[in-house]
Amino acid sequence: MALFFKVPQATVIIIERLGRFHRVATSGLRFCLPFLDSPKQLPAWGQGVRAHFNGDPILVELAEQQTDTQPRTIITRDNVEMMADAAVFWQIVDPVRAIYEVDNLPRSITDLAVTTLRNLLGATTLNDALGARGRINEGLLAEIEATSRKWGVRVNRVELQELRAANTEASGAMLQQMSADREKDARIARAQGERQARRLRAEGTAEALRTLVEADLQIYRQAAAEMGRDRAWRYLLSLKYLQTLEHIAESPSVKIFLPGGAELDPVATGLAGLPGPEALAARAGRSDAE
């Protein structure tokens, strides 16, 4: 090895002295003692290192790297064969542990991802796996991160790349299940929307009724203050009677036969000589202002 050497950006070199770990050479121009110091050779990695110094792989990548597992057949808990593979995005944060704590880091991460994926899918049914892609990703990330942390590796994310049934019959069942789940979600959303609309309509109706009752009560109080409670009560009943007739008359398909003679006497008696509701409301407004 030369007396001076350059280490590229985002890489390091593990320097050994007389066969034992000595130091980590980071990016830049570095110095080593010939015959005493030598770079750690990593020929078995094949990934995560770059060729340098006469083609020998010694540069350890510190940038994020991706490891893809090959599609594999996995049997779910309900004995359905599925094809699944995942992509693991990882990064070396401790080069010393990444070199000395595990024999072949990239291969170990791949094997760990395959084993974890098989365990997670093997513990679920086909229906659960169809709608649990996010949960499976989270489970893979947690399991792989827990194990690879002791290797000096940080796992940034794990993503399922493929998740499908291995045969046509199971694929049809998968599509039917996905369609049924979407329809169920749509029904739930519609039901929630209708329930919300009914609640809002009921609240609006209750608020309108409350406003009408408060207005009638205000008119009654004003009338009672001017003419006594008994006459005010008869006045309010007579007024409501006429308002009801007006509401019924708004329908073109309804014929109204007004009573005459003595039947209208209570109404006439209740309204005779009394101020109208607008006048009472105006007086109530002036009273409140005072």
Image (tube, rainbow, N blue to C red):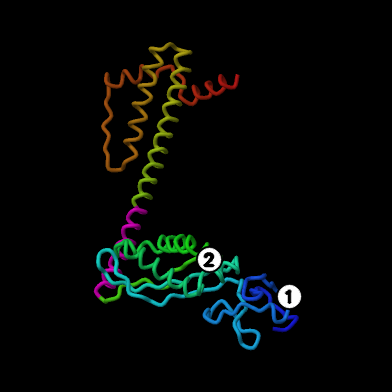
Point 38% across, 24% down: residue = 239
- SS label for mark 2: helix
Question: On the image, numbered disc 1 is attached to which residue?
Answer: 28
* Residue 63 drawn above or below residue 183: below
Q: Which mark is residue 151?
A: 2
For the residues labelled 1 and 2, the Cα–Cα distance comes to 25 Å
Q: Nearer the viewer, residue 135 or 26?
A: 26
Magenta includes 206?
A: no
Provide the residue span drawn in magenta.
169-190
Point 56% across, 19% down: residue = 287
Magenta includes 177?
A: yes
| Quadrant of the rendered image containing residue 187 | bottom left
Q: Nearer the viewer, residue 165 or 203?
A: 165
**Sequence-earlier tag: 1 or 2:** 1
| Quadrant of the rendered image containing residue 231 | top left
Where is residue 172 shown, x and y percent of the image?
27, 72
Where is residue 118 shown, x and y percent of the image?
36, 68
Where is residue 258 shown, x and y percent of the image?
28, 29
Mark 1 closeness class: few <14, some 14–19, many ≥20 residues within 10 Å: few
Where is residue 241 shown, x and y percent of the image?
34, 26
